[in-house]
Image (tube, rainbow, N blue to C red):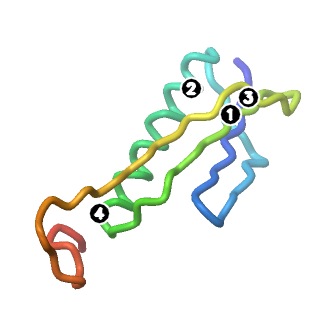
């Protein structure tokens, strides 16, 4: 098992992962980062926040392995009110 770290960047905010998580393989770590980026992006989209979410995966030596980016965009084709989105909580 190897430990991987997920640093999260979303617009103006960055959160460095100093604890890390053990995974059986690099592929498992990247899959987990992908799921996390998608879940975070989906949750934010429900609140009307369309900022990109980027998760940088680092290994135990601190080397950046890859970056997973979830990009959300709302493209309106009709006029809409400035109130909350009907599906937001």
Q: Residue at x 11, y 66 (%)?
A: 78
First in sequence: mark 4 vs mark 2? 2
Find residue 63 and report its horizontal and vertical position in percent: 83, 28
Q: Name the residue under label 3.
A: 3
First in sequence: mark 3 vs mark 4? 3
Q: Which of marks 3 and 2 is in front?
A: 2
Q: Which residue is drawn at 34% across and 60% down?
A: 45
Q: Mark 2 points at which residue?
A: 30
Q: Name the residue under label 1.
A: 57
- Distance from the alpha carbon under mark 3 to that under mark 4: 32 Å
* Mark seen at residue 46: 4
CB atoms of marks 1 and 2 within 8 Å: yes
Under circle 4, the secondary element is loop
Quarter of the figure with the N terminus: top right
Find residue 56 and report its horizontal and vertical position in percent: 67, 38
Is 75 positioned to the left or the right of 26 in the image? left
């Amino acid at each position: 098992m190897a430990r991987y770290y997920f640093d999260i960047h979303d617009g103006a905010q960055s959160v460095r992962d100093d604890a890390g998580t053990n995974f059986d393989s690099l592929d498992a770590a990247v899959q987990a980062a992908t799921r996390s980026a998608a879940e975070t992006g989906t949750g934010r989209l429900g609140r009307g926040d369309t900022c990109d979410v980027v998760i940088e995966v680092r290994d135990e030596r601190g080397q950046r392995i890859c970056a997973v980016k979830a990009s959300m965009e709302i493209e309106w084709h009709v006029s809409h009110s400035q109130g909350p989105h009907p599906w937001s909580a």
